[in-house]
Image: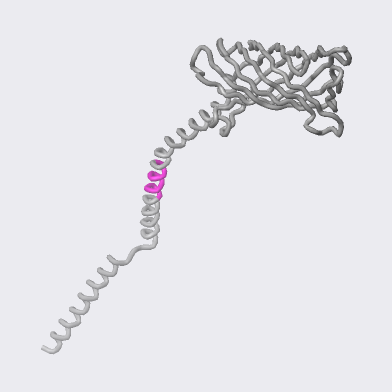
Amino acid sequence: MRGCNALRRACGRTGKTRQNATVWRRLSIDPKTQRRNDNNYRSAAMDRVISIRLRMNKSSNKPTLAALLAICVMGAAPLSRAAERQPVMVSAYYGSGSVVFFYGAEAIWTPGCECAWLTRYNLDPRFAVNVAYWKGHDTPPEHHSLWDVGGHALLRSTFLKDNAVSPFIEFGTGVQLLSETRINASRYLGTHYQFGSRVGAGIAWGSPRRYELLTFLEHVSNAGLSSGPNDGVTYVAVQFRVGLD
């Protein structure tokens, strides 16, 4: 009996050992299988990441394209404004003042720039160059004429731009080069270099504002740069301008 019981206990231990070995075999993982499972897991994870990135790229293309279109529009806007600016204008004017007659020709153009601080106040920049003949009508007829070449930087404010006729005001300053420093018997200008300050008003019409008629007041003097006399001249002029196609 004792022998049988010992045999039974030994067989029970053997069965348990076999069961435990089976469990451990189930729980243990072969290195090759582990590597293959890891690779499968990593590849699945990478597929998820790639798919998420693709969805993000697709969704982000729309804002990117919109931004590019906005940049193109913003870049083209100054070009369109420059293309719409007024043409170069040529003009003739006649003036009188300080016992002098003034016969002049002038060219005016817009620089094609947009300045926010000027636009805020409804101001447009312009440049002008002129050639003028001054003829004195004092007696006796000494130093009765001279020539003047100069240029002005002007600012203009236009009203009722959508109307057929648009009024405007214009003002600015510039420099003048005179062929003589004296005109008439007693008007001494001091230097050949002079400064001119101008203010005027007029109307513009035609398409695109091809014609302008204005009157302006201008004062020319050397601004005290000469130690000698600085009589200067002040005159009122009427000017007609025509835009070139």
Report the side of 103 relative to 226 (left or right).
Answer: left
Q: What stretch is highlighted in magenta?
A: 46-54
Chief SS of the magenta region? helix
Check the image and report above or below for 46 versus 199: below
Q: Quadrant of residue 184?
A: top right
165 or 113: nearer the eye? Answer: 165
x and y percent of residue 4 in the render? 13, 85
Residue 19 lies within the magenta run: no
x and y percent of residue 162 in the render? 49, 17
Q: Quadrant of residue 180?
A: top right
Q: Quadrant of residue 131?
A: top right
Residue found farthest to the front: 139
Check the image and report above or below for 207 versus 37: above
Check the image and report above or below for 212 versus 220: above
Residue found farthest to the bottom: 2
x and y percent of residue 135 in the render? 81, 13
Residue 49 lies within the magenta run: yes
Residue found farthest to the left: 1
Q: Measuring 70% from the left and 21% from the top, which residue is drawn there? A: 128
Q: Measuring 79% from the left and 26% from the top, which residue is drawn there? A: 194
Q: Measuring 34% from the left and 64% from the top, which residue is drawn there? A: 29
